[in-house]
Image (cartoon, helix red, strand yellow):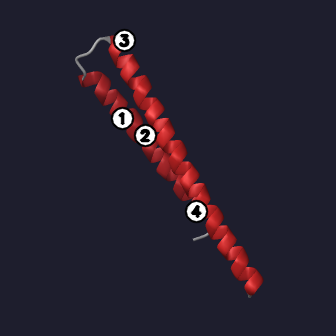
């Protein structure tokens, strides 16, 4: 897998997470028997949680990509 393919995979994955979050939030709004204020607070909390998880995931993937690049560089130097 090339570096560009890794980037594309990450972009598609994050887009899927984002789309899933939007669909879930919309469904929650439609079916939740709560006041508008309660719903807004809940959505805010969920979006903060999603943002945090996404940032953590991106950080992990960047670390993996850097490690793979380091291994490729070491292999190139050793060859």
Whole-Å distance between the Cαs marked 2 and 3?
24 Å
Q: Answer whether labels 4 and 2 touch (C-beta < 8 Å).
A: no
Q: Which mark lies nearer to you, 4 or 2?
A: 4
Q: Which of the image's four quarters has the N terminus?
A: bottom right
Tell me the residue that label 3 is attached to. Answer: 37
Secondary element at tag 1: helix
Numbered badge on residue 19: 2
Whole-Å distance between the Cαs marked 4 and 2?
24 Å
Image point (66%, 74%), residue name? 71
In the displayed structure image, the side of residue 70 where residue 6 appears, left or right = left
Q: Earlier in the sequence, mark 4 or mark 2?
A: 2
Q: Earlier in the sequence, mark 2 or mark 3?
A: 2
For mark 2, does the 10 Å Cα neighbourhood hold few (<14), some (14 to 19), or many (20 or more) residues? few
From this view, report whether residue 14 is shown above or below residue 72.
above
In the displayed structure image, the side of residue 67 where residue 9 appears, left or right = left
Question: Quarter-wise, where is residue 30 in the image?
Answer: top left
Residue in front for this viewpoint, 60 or 24: 60
Tell me the residue that label 1 is attached to. Answer: 23
For mark 3, does the 10 Å Cα neighbourhood hold few (<14), some (14 to 19), or many (20 or more) residues? few
Whole-Å distance between the Cαs marked 3 and 4?
41 Å
Tell me the residue that label 4 is attached to. Answer: 64
Numbered badge on residue 46: none
In this rendering, does residue 3 appear at all?
no
Q: Answer whether labels 3 and 1 touch (C-beta < 8 Å).
A: no
Secondary element at tag 2: helix
Whole-Å distance between the Cαs marked 3 and 1?
20 Å
Q: Earlier in the sequence, mark 4 or mark 1?
A: 1
Q: Residue furthest right?
A: 77
From this view, report whether residue 75 is shown above or below residue 58.
below
Whole-Å distance between the Cαs marked 2 and 1?
6 Å
x and y percentages locating residue 13 in the rendered image: 48, 51
């Amino acid at each position: 897998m090339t570096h560009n393919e890794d980037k594309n995979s990450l972009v598609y994955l994050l887009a899927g997470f984002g789309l899933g979050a939007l669909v879930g939030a919309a469904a929650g709004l439609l079916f939740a028997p709560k006041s508008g204020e309660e719903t807004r607070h809940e959505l805010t909390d969920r979006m903060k949680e999603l943002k945090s998880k996404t940032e953590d995931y991106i950080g992990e993937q960047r670390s993996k990509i850097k490690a793979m690049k380091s291994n490729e560089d070491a292999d190139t130097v050793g060859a």
